[in-house]
Amino acid sequence: MEWGIITKENFKSAYDVPIKRWDPLSTVSITTKDFGLRKERVRYYGHYSYISPIRGERPKGFKSGEISYEHLDCTEYPIDEVKDIFMSISEGKKIYYNDGTPIGDGFTIIVTEDEKRRDSPFSKTPHKIERIPDSCKAITLINRYPSMARIVSSEIKTSMEEILPAHIKLAQGINLVTISRHFYPSLCFNLIPENVLLGILLSMKAAILYTIEEAIERDYYDIPVSPFFNIGTKVGGSQPRIHGQIYIDLTMDGHGLRLEGYLRAFKEMGDNCHLCETTHGDSDRIILKTKYWTFYTTGSPVRNYHIRFHPNEHIRRFSQLNVNQLLDLAKSLKMIFVALDNIEIDKNRNILFNCCPYGYDANFHLFGDIIPHEIIGGAEMGDDMRVARKLPHEAADEIRRAISG
Ligand SMILES: [Zn+2]
């Protein structure tokens, strides 16, 4: 079931494949046309979980005895000595850990090499690794240990639909991972060249467009797309090399509660888009405003030092960002990450991009979140609520000083 392929040969039971389970206590049917109502299918919004047995088998970043996260020092990081799981893919040859065990088995599926299209996102056959040119900045791969099934034979699909109750679906979709061609530790943003970070963002964009085109060819529609970065083990980053990820959900059964909130809020705003018009607390929460982007500390933080950002242009999706916007984003993200390091904010951080799903005819302004790691408590798990201690305008002032510092 690696690579998200389910066939008669590897299918054991309906509970041994990735499933998407909607919580019956927080799931309701979609009834609005611009948020995905379709006559031919019942669709939901609410809380759901992907449950994927294959996730447990994914390798952890470094083997013991190798350089690890714990040895990390962003000023003197021994990049040349690092061996990580992606190295055999980028170098196109067998590479061995210091104890003699080989890294990987020599197979991969490459969706985009920089922006160039390679293997189909629906490819059924992983191929032998080959050397990626040194000049390449980033490649986007099919995640070998996905939370969704990418290719499922139609008999299995039909039989699962018959067996499973309405709130449990076969989780269908594509999980992509974009890595830098050369090793850069994700926790050391000061070491990542701007053009490499730009290369990652461009490769992600090209892979999204390729995947969506191919998905529509295969009659998928209404597709939520979530690009994100997990930076550090505490926020889900199992690999030490800088990498972006994209979840493309092809289950066609709706979207999550959080996205429903965003869709409704933008609908209520109508032509008066909050992100186009606001000054973000009379500008004292803005930390960086460039030609293309605005970064500010959100007034209702999910964690202390939660930063929100949006393109100044009212566009709906990550894949609509042009190269100027992405280059400016790469520069700005580096600047902000280094500033956060300088004021000693936890280096484990997520970057999320909130996008309008493909096929939805909703008003939406793309925005992102930078969320540093923090432990959260019980009351906060109980609802869409957080308790923060840092006043957002004071957090903004600290970050601004660190940027200009
Ligand atoms: Zn707007």
Image (tube, rainbow, N blue to C red):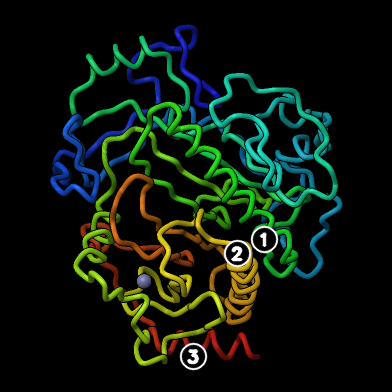
Residue drawn 20% across the image and 37% down it: 38
Counting every numbered tag in the picture gives: 3
Measured along the vertical axis of the image, is residue 193 above or below residue 277?
above
Relative placement, left or right, of 199 versus 143 is right
Q: Secondary structure at mark 3?
A: helix
Relative placement, left or right, of 34 versus 308 is left
Q: Residues within 10 Å of mark 1 (few under 14, many from 20)?
A: many
Q: Quadrant of the C terminus?
A: bottom right
Q: Which residue is mark 2?
A: 326
Q: Which residue is mark 3?
A: 397
Q: What amino acid is labelled 1 in the image?
A: Leu
Q: Which residue is mark 1?
A: 198
Measured along the vertical axis of the image, is residue 43 above or below residue 155?
below
Rounded to the nearest angstrom, the CA distance separating label 1 from label 2 is 6 Å
Residue drawn 51% across the image and 55% down it: 234
Q: Nearer the viewer, mark 1 or mark 3?
A: 1
